[in-house]
Amino acid sequence: MKTLARKLRLADYFALGFGTMVGVGWLVLMDDWLGRGGPLGAVLGFAIGGIILLPVAYVYGQWVQRLPDAAGEAAYTAQVFPPLVSYFTGWMMLLAYFIVCPWEAVAAGKVAAYIFPSLNSFQLYSIDGQPVFLPRLLLGIAMTAFLAVLNYRGIRLSATSFHAAPFVSILLTLQIVPYFMTGFESVPKVAEEAHPEFRSQGFFRAIAMAVLVGAAFYVLSVAAVAYVAPWQSLLGKRFATAIAFEQALGARWPVRLILAVALFGLFQCFNGNFVASSRLLFAFGRRGTILPRFGEVHEKFLTPSVAVLGITAGTLVALFFGDALLVPVTEVGSMASALGWLAACASFWLVDSRPRMRVIAGLGICVSLLLVLMKLLPAFPGHFTPWEWLALGLWLLLGALLHRRPRA
């Protein structure tokens, strides 16, 4: 049986984890972040989120040393839970990664249109009041196609201070932390593609660095915007980050330069999530829990070529929802990520009986369970809306339709 190419080193794993995490949310949705908790609430939300995720990151570092499997959470939970639990755990994590792909493709059009306003022309239709423009749609399609070719050929080519009460402000930001911090656990998805000389201890180093640097980046982004402009004036305005710096600098060209550079960050995030979701889909096919063809390895490039094409097709379909996709995807993706973290920590708690490891895994369980409950329980502000429940239900239904009895 052919195996995937083994080329990745520590720098590649860190780039993948950080790149999967940090895209252009800090540009496109800054108004939503400030509206949730004000600048201080958003800063504390991301800072606290980065710190409390360290036990979860440690668990993933331990798991990937024990079980370097592209199936990630599905493989971990399979050690202690029934096959159906394992499958749907992995299916939810697939949602967390895959959903970012069309998100970034849509966001690319928004960023490019701020630099080149003529892209906001030739409206095709609108969804929930959000117009879909032909040039931006074509840009997203072109970017998706380029990434598909890149991943098809090889992985190294691709790797006041508060707005509400202080507690509520931090809580509302913490609810979206899982979505915007999702990425560090993408490292195990490509563990099988480590260079033969790569030491297994390096997995945790890459994961921990991605978590801490990612959280610091978000904290600094919010702080910088709040420093250069009155944050209340930015509420309800798309590209609040760009608007703030444009007001502060009194010129538009530096902002265009910043946005042009940010497009490269968007591309990296898009690519990281494309890699992680295609590897998960590949792992499902290899385990026989979905159509086995998805588990095929390309004869020449040693890549999961059929899985890459599957993620490409799904991304292209979702692209047609346009800007209406952005905020709801954030909410559903946050819950999906936290649910995967919960399953990984719970599985590790059951398989490792050492007291120190159980304490760390227990902390990870508490953190991820809280993040899941904040989205599901009506007692928490910012819980799921009916549309988000519908999106989640449709994804689970699709998973049930595609599921097959796993191979022996």
Image: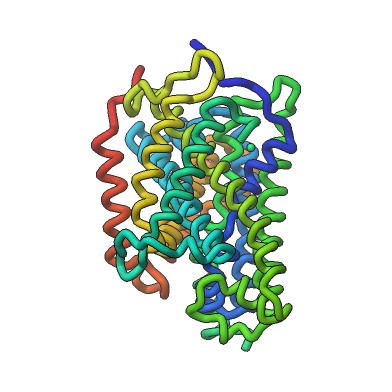
What is the x, y in percent for residue 174? 54, 67
Q: Quadrant of residue 399?
A: top left
Q: Residue at x 60, y 69 (%)?
A: 45
Q: Residue furthest bottom?
A: 160
Q: Please state which of residues 104 and 33 is positioned toward the viewer in this rendering.
A: 104
Q: Quadrant of residue 10?
A: top right
- Asked whether, in this view, residue 274 is left or right of residue 383, the answer is right
Q: Quadrant of residue 121?
A: bottom left
Q: Residue at x 63, y 47 (%)?
A: 19
Colour mapping used in the image = rainbow
What is the x, y in percent for residue 155? 60, 30
Answer above or below: position of 335 versus 131.
Answer: above
Residue 338 visible, this angle = no
What is the x, y in percent for residue 394? 27, 49
What is the x, y in percent for residue 73? 48, 38
Answer above or below: position of 255 versus 264.
Answer: below
Total numbered circles: 0
